[in-house]
Image (cartoon, rainbow, N blue to C red):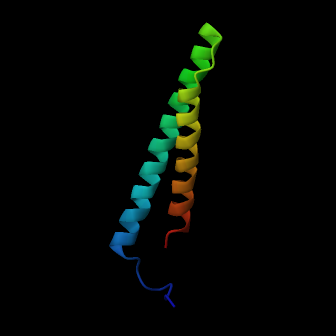
Amino acid sequence: MSDPALPTRPIATALRYLAIIVACACLLLAAFCLAVAAQVFVQTGAFAQSYAMVGFISAALGLLALMLARMWN
């Protein structure tokens, strides 16, 4: 068992911050891809499936990375 009074390990802290950075990057990429897909749909009426799929996958990875960062001790 881990004692809550002990300081956190520096590697665990670095990995937590890295997970937060990766999550933010994935969510930013998701927002960009979905915005491009929406703009293509509005201008041409055609659904940009590749951008939408990349956006949804990136959003899922970003949320998973945020969950990992929250649960990392």
Residue sticking out furthest to the left = 10
Where is residue 46 drawn, in percent x and y? 63, 14
Kindly indicate the quadrant of the structure image that contains residue 19.
bottom left
Where is residue 21 drawn, in percent x and y? 42, 50
Q: Is residue 73 above or below residue 45?
A: below
Q: Is residue 40 above or below residue 20?
A: above
Describe residue 22's horizontal placement relative to residue 36 as left or right. left
Rendered residue at 36%/64% (across/down): 14
Numbered-mark total: 0
Rendered residue at 49%/88% (across/down): 2
Kindly indicate the quadrant of the structure image that contains residue 41.
top right
Q: Is residue 43 above or below residue 23?
A: above
70 or 29, nearer to the observer: 29
Rendered residue at 52%/62% (across/down): 68
Residue sticking out furthest to the top = 44
56 or 1, nearer to the observer: 56
Rendered residue at 61%/8% (across/down): 44
Where is residue 22 drawn, in percent x and y? 43, 50
46 or 7, nearer to the observer: 46
